Amino acid sequence: MRRRLIPACVLGGTMGLQLTDTYHSLLKAVPRPPPLTSALPMCYSSPLTDAHKALRPAATQDVRTSCALFAAKATADEAPKRRACLASLWLAYGMLDECHALVVAESYSGSDAAYIHALLHRKEGAFVGEFSMTGWANSKYWWGVLGAHPLFEAVAVAAAEMPREPSPLLEDWHLDGWDPYAFVDLCAAAHASGDETAMAYCRAVAEVEWDLLHGHILAGLE
């Protein structure tokens, strides 16, 4: 199992976050690697049907809002950050519609919400969703809304250090900083070509990216 990149001080509760046992149980049960790159359709139904809810992993069944993750009551400033925290967990479980419901209203005003929004549509992949857009195209739209993000440098470093097996797609993959549009294209090409070597690389990078983003969100709540 790959080492988690979420800061130990966050997970250890020394930052005053008062994370609950429910949070730690959810984090512990996140699949490794998380299903962040295998394409998954969305239903875009609100409220979600009982049949859809029944598909949720057991660890998530009783979690309704971000209030379950924190012992203390949220301030007005903390509330959207806490929703982003829960949304990132839903993303890691592949619960894209639940994730989408938490970030859609705040994606134009909060950079972390927009980041998560771009990731969930990247996960949607080649499936056609809202506005007759593929997940790939919708992801690029939200990367455009997001613009620059402080995590890009760390993601670029992690991606550059990630071991790569020989692959035609990866031979053409050159990093000069982090380009989220180019990574969407790489994921799309890997899916379309069935290049499992490239897909393995995409999964590894996406896992590190998720760890960095989730830790960043929690650190912002300290």
Image (cartoon, rainbow, N blue to C red):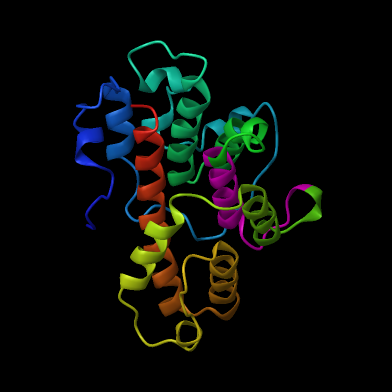
Please indicate, yes or no, whether residue 52 appears anywhere in the rendered image.
no
Q: What residue sits 49% from the left and 60% below the top?
A: 37
Image quadrant holding the C terminus, namely: top left
Residue at 57 percent across and 80 percent down: it is 193
Q: Nearer the viewer, residue 124 or 13?
A: 13
Which residue is depicted at the point 66% across and 58% down?
140
Report x, y in % for residue 181: 60, 65
- In the depicted structure, whether residue 15 falls above or below residue 41: above
Q: Nearer the viewer, residue 160 or 94?
A: 160
Task: Verify whether residue 117 appears in magenta.
Answer: yes
Q: Is residue 81 visible?
A: yes
Q: Locate residue 169, reporting x and y percent.
A: 50, 83
Q: Nearer the viewer, residue 124 or 7?
A: 7
- The rendered magenta stretch, by its main secondary structure, is classed as helix
**Above or below for 132 versus 161:** above
| Residue depicted at 43% across the width and 51% down the height | 151
Relative image position of residue 62 (x, y in whole percent): 42, 22
The x and y percentages for residue 57 are: 42, 37
Query: With 163 as the anchor, is 48 left or right in this view?
Result: right
What stretch of residues is rendered in magenta?
112-130
